[in-house]
Amino acid sequence: MIWRFGLLDSVFAPLAPSHWALACALVLPLLAGVVAACVPPRRTWPVLAVCVLVVACGAWLMMDAWQAGLLRWQWSVAGVTIALRLNGLGALLLVVSQCVAAAAALYAPGFLRLESPGPQARWLWPLMGVTLFALSLVWMAADLLTLYAGLELLSLAAVGMLVLSGKPAALEAGMRYLLLTLVGSLTYLMGVALIIGHWGELSLARLAEVVEPGAVAWIAASLLGAGLALKAALFPLHGWLTPVHQSAWTPVSALHAGLVIKASLYILILLWSILLPETHWAPRFVAWLGALGIVWGGLIAWRAQTLKTLVASSTVAQLGYLMVAFPLLLGPGVAPIAKSLAWQGFWLQLLGHALAKSAMFLAAGNLILATGESSLAGLAGTSRRLPLSLLIFGIASITLMGLPPSAGFTAKWLLLHAMVLEGHWVAVAALLIGTLLTAAYMFRMFRYSFDETAPRHHYQPLGRGMDAIALVLALAALVMGLLAHLPLALLQGGDA
Amino acid sequence: MTENMAWLPLAALAVSLVAAIAIFSLPETARPVRTVINLGAAVCKVALVALMVGRVSLGFEDTFSFQIIGGIDFVLRADALGVMFAGLSSILWLCTTVYAIGYLEGAANRKRFFGFFSLCVTSTLGIALAGNLFTFLIFYEMLTLSTYPLVVHAGTQKALAAGKVYLRYTLSAGVVLLLGVVILYSLTGDQSFASEQGLDRYLDDHRGLLTLVFALLVGGLAVKAAIVPLHGWLPRAMVAPAPVSALLHAVAVVKAGAFGILRIIYDLYGIELSALLGVTTVLAVIASITILYGSLRAITQAELKPRLAYSTISQVSYIVLGVCLVGPFGTIGALAHLLNQGLMKVTLFFCAGSYAEELGIHRIDEMNGAGRRMPLTSLAFTVGALGMMGLPPTAGFITKWYLGIGAIEAEMLWVVAVLVASTLLNALYFLPIVYRLWFCQGPAHGVGQWPDEQRLGRLETHGWLLWPAVFTALASLGAGLLAGLPFSPLEWATRVAVGEYLP
């Protein structure tokens, strides 16, 4: 399992330009964020220039990682060795993060112009930069310390972004999120301390060699697991998620729901595959919670009254899809074919959901901005007046429902295939029920929008490109389903 | 001629997809451009499918494929059975587009309507040309998604409620189908429809599993094919505009289900294996029940469109019944009916829509004497109705004749009884309408008034509404009269059946 994460020695050294690409991919978001805080961009093109550069660096790293199989960097600073590594999986996550962050950043100027918030808006840019930096760090970290630093930075930046709108509700939800995420960090830190105290290893690769199953591994894994589950909003620790999104700014929600919570999930599966390889009960437990989460999240979204609650609750259910795959990835005695299918399905689902959920948040934000109403009933008549925003929402919802030809479908196919091979029928049922529940709440929203009897009211015209950005993300999630072998080849590429 | 023109099936599929994208990107007010795109794409598609038919008759099977994930490909293949369904859908798309342009004159949300209409046809063609079960599944689900906005088009509470029921049935069925496909793939790997090797080699070890998968697959498809007791969505979906009902009933949704069952039995399991598993007999009984139940319910309907809807439920099961007779004649009857029923049913729905638009007629007791006011429409309706009953020389007669021979050949005499009973029932619910049209005194004779008369055109109604109905009526007459000529539905059905039974 460890080799799948690229925790081994690399054969080839990174190409010379890759060092620059790495530096650029890490530092440029920070730098651009600071500059934008001083001189907030009023137009889209300066943002676009930076985004193109960052994504180009990510794409370069991805190409190099694909060819070399694994890239490693190592520095010694004051006696502490810091190492970064990038394999196919990491590169894929990196590029998708950069793309989603770029979409959120490109969306922001138009959004801020319409929203006309106070002077605190300028803080959005550095916080976004820090978020992308921290995400990149998490995908590339090769030791516990870097991982912790990335996670902590990510959580704080996320809290900062989510309270930017300054509404009392946002502040209250943000405070709760801050407290919970600090509790999560503390628990996580205790787990890390236990590992370091007992095995004395920071590097993940060497830790994997020395870890032996036993009480310490179990306690450490449960501490880490609890902390990360809280941060990732895994059922039943998801209570903070919906209120936080309720009053947050649209681009922030897109970034947060699409990526930030995924980082915690990534760390969770990475550390558990080191600490608890081939265990029976821990992944089973997560899978049971996941199955419940699929149903619970679906039901909450089904009776949601506002659009943002619907979209945010659906995240809880979608994370459940990932949780039910845990026994296939970590469980004992799983056939190699099933494991490989589940591995591909897991990441494809995560990536597809990241793209589709951010697209959906942007589309929902557009609908709310244009109608001036946040309730579902306020959407009546939008199918006539705002067909494009609604179509984007629809395309994104195809991925979330897991209907063909979307990434969600191909991922679900892979997971189902693995589950059928292994005879995990409860998980199969959970996935299929999840499909129906998702369809139920998505089409409930469309039913409101098709209502032609509603009174007409004023619609705020949207900025150019605000729909286009969401459309590109939604279509990317759709096309990823048909061309799934390309990203999946990259996952395999890291294996070699 | 080259060996494999891979672009051909892809182009046939892409024409309507591109049309849909173009329509979505045009503004609502761009009516002339939209009309040109609609008709141009429909004509292009007919031409491309005609080319495909020619290629198949020369013995080529054009195939387009690319990899989706390891071991699973996206495959479009123009084989005889697929091209048959593709031909039906492309010709009826052209007719229905013409009709819809006239029908929706001045209505709201036309951009949305025609956009999803094109997507719906794309999905139907994809279903026809799908070369393996995975590709089939993709387009089958796409069909559900693209027809929903058409069903709820009116935006009224009734339409929205009907849409809800429609989704509840079709999406649940989609999930069942998905489960069946996944289990089958985990057993056999990618199984092409073109594979010479059926699933026979799994019979000894996995008999129970094969039967279960068959039940899941056919159960999932039976919802769209409106087989009793999974038919509940169809009469409710009648709130959709007339062109949508026409397309849904004649080609798109119900036929997609029936066509899927054909693919499963002929190209996936193979007819011998299906017979060995004993599933065909069960299916034949269910189909017979559906035929009789649909006809009985049709008699009790007082409104025209619901009566036609129940008639569809009954007629589509002829296709399934024909397949389950497990013999060449039954197959010919089933395949010919796939085409003939499409032509006849679309005619009937066109006429029903024209009556509603021109005269405001929705109920059957309002139809007295409409033959005098709208002679051509009524003539077309009469041809369709007689065809449904299976009177010579219409297309419907061909079907029943071959089904009857097939039943006798298979020594299933009770099927003959079902056919006779069904014909009587058909006559019971269609003949009164025909009688009212031509022989009752109505507003055209100065007795009473039409519910809501409009004078839509110089002719008896708007030309865009009239000519498609006349064309399809003539076509369904021709399919019966000229059944012996090459490229007629019967001839093509025979070609497919021969390919199936004489390898």
Image (cartoon, helix red, strand yellow):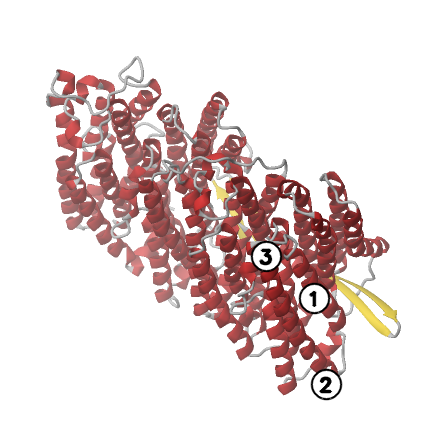
**Quarter of image, res B444:** top left
Residue under the point 19% across and 22% down: B450
The residue lying toward the viewer, choosing from B414 and B30, is B30
Q: Please state, as top left, top right, bottom left or bottom right, where the C terminus of chain A lies in the image.
A: bottom right
Label 1 crowding class (10 Å Cα cut-off): few <14, some 14-19, many 20+?
many
Across and down, in percent, residue B273 comes to: 34, 57
- Left or right, A28 with respect to B155, comes to right
Q: Secondary structure at mark 1?
A: helix
Q: Which residue is mark 3?
A: A168
The answer to whether residue A269 is visible is no
Q: Which residue is mark 1?
A: A151
> Taking A197 as reference, is A270 above or below it?
above
The residue lying toward the viewer, choosing from A402 and A187, is A187
Sequence-earlier tag: 3 or 2 = 3
Across and down, in percent, residue A59 comes to: 74, 50
> Taking A139 as reference, is B147 above or below it?
above
Q: CA gap, disc 1 to disc 2? A: 22 Å
Chain letter behind tag 3: A
Sequence-earlier tag: 1 or 2 = 1
Across and down, in percent, residue B61 comes to: 48, 39
The answer to whether residue A59 is visible is yes
Sequence-earlier tag: 1 or 3 = 1
Q: Which residue is mark 2?
A: A198
The residue lying toward the viewer, choosing from A157 and A47, is A157
Chain letter behind tag 1: A
Amino acid on which disc 3 is placed: Pro
Amino acid on which disc 1 is placed: Leu
Q: CA gap, disc 1 to disc 3? A: 27 Å
Q: Secondary structure at mark 3?
A: helix
Amino acid on which disc 2 is placed: His
